[in-house]
Amino acid sequence: MLEHGGRLRAAVRRYGIAEADWLDLSTGIAPYDWDLPAIPAAAWARLPELDDGLEEAARRYYGCASLLPVAGSQAAIQALPRLRERSRVGVISPCYAEHAHAWRREGHELEALDAETAERELERFDVLLVVNPNNPTGQRLDRQTLLEWRARLAGKGGWLLVDEAFMDCTPQESLAGDCPLPGLVVLRSFGKFFGLAGIRLGFVLAEPQLLQRLEEWLGPWAVSGPARALAKALLADQAGQTRQREALLRDGQRLESLLRDCGLPASGGTALFQRLLRDDALALHEFLAARGILTRLFETPPSLRFGLPPDEAGWERLGQALIDYSKERP
């Protein structure tokens, strides 16, 4: 198992700080509460029905007619490599490590790339994997470049696989509306933007034939009835989505400004997180953890990812800790 953010109980054991006393900034998940609708009793008592309106709500939200709900985009990340013969896969790196892990485990040949190398040497690959916006760097690739890469790959039966887990705040940059173009596979996460990672729901946007193969591999009832009912309601809540998007964009800028003002400028980020690329990343991670503030540490290259505090108390606590660190390590 690869390491991820959100392992709060492990931090409790390591640092001896009670779980309730932590400010957990280790994930890129929206920290705000959402007014959740009631879940019908039948959603708990019956097997999930596929004509309950979830797919229709998701098609409207993503602007795509061809999609498949899955138990978190992680389920698709693990399954998609099994739907291709042994392929040469380029991965725009660094990125969410589960992608490379899944393709390598299924025997595919992997190569880490940057965007410039991908543009120049795309013909060497059968699959190009892009996380856009990138996690953890925050790098964005423009739609036109990605669509050109898709056309070049599709011409020889290849895939452009784009993970848009952090795209909800900038839907104008998404390729969702371009699906189902041949060779284009787009992954969308539900939990990050809506702040409901525990629901374990994501969507795969692709050609119907590919989605049928993926659905057959995943098997029946891949998404629970309660998850389907809750997601259907929130995907239709346009007013709530607008409030969420505005709050995330505002607080993403606030986090970037806070880090800069404390002498710790971010090297990139999104509305949901900011990344610090620093040689002293481990020292800063430990300094904050000793004060009950959990960040996501990356060893190669040394860097930290900061999620958003959930309230004013959290903002003040983070700001003071960063000031204290800057004073100790000028």
Image: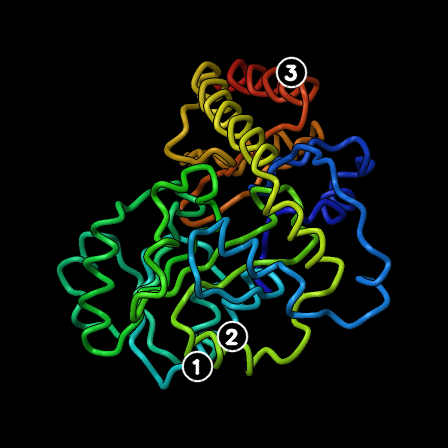
The correct choice, above or below, for 47 with respect to 74 in the image is below
Residue at horizontal 38 percent and vertical 52 percent from the top? 94
Q: Earlier in the sequence, mark 1 or mark 3?
A: 1
* 65 vs 312, nearest the viewer: 65
- Name the residue carrying label 1: 83
Residue at horizontal 45 percent and vertical 40 percent from the top? 303
- Name the residue carrying label 2: 79
- Where residue 240 sits: x, y (%)? 61, 34
Name the residue type under label 3: Glu
Give the SS element for disc 2: helix
- Name the residue carrying label 3: 316
* 181 vs 108, nearest the viewer: 181
The correct choice, above or below, for 289 with respect to 260 in the image is below
Name the residue type under label 1: Leu
Horizontal placement of 9 versus 77: left or right? right
Using the rendered view, name the quadrant where residue 149 is placed: bottom left
Horizontal placement of 299 versus 293: left or right? left
